[in-house]
Image (cartoon, helix red, strand yellow):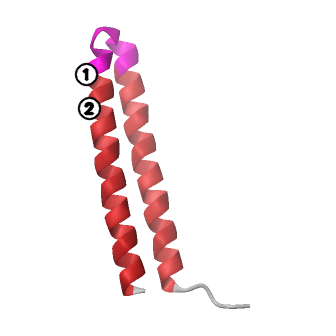
Amino acid sequence: MEPISLTAVGLGIIVLGAGYGIGKLANGAMEAMARQPEISSKIQTAMIVAAALIEGAALFAIVVALLKG
């Protein structure tokens, strides 16, 4: 059995962090939309932009981890 490389551990942490961040983002957005449904389109747009930024940062971190590993 081959030992787990540090790159694989780093990639797992990156994916978990990105998933947690997007989950927290979606949770906050859903709560805000429930409180103020009249501005839900603005909240949804901001949520999508923020999720894209989180995904971009995670993708950058994955590329760096793969290049270093």
Q: Which residues are magenta?
A: 33-42
State the CA–CA distance, disc 2 to disc 1.
Answer: 6 Å
Residue 30 image offset from top left, x and y in percent: 41, 25
The image position of residue 50, as x and y in percent, is 29, 42
Give the residue number, with chain letter if any, for mark 2.
46
- Give me the residue at 68% from left, 91% from top: 2
Magenta span includes 64 = no
Residue 24: image quadrant is: top left
Q: Main secondary structure of the magenta part?
A: helix
Frontmost residue, 5 versus 63: 63
Picture layout, residue 63 above or below residue 37: below
The residue lying toward the viewer, choosing from 42 and 27, is 42
Q: Residue at point 32% right, 46% down?
A: 52
Secondary structure under tag 2 reads helix
Residue drawn at x 43%, y 86% is 69
Please say if 64 is above or below 36. Answer: below
The label shown at residue 42 is 1
Q: Position of residue 6 (x, y in %)?
A: 49, 84
What's under tag 1, amino acid-wise?
Answer: Lys
- Indicate whether residue 40 is drawn in magenta: yes
Q: Is residue 46 left or right of residue 18?
A: left
Q: Amino acid at mark 2?
A: Ala
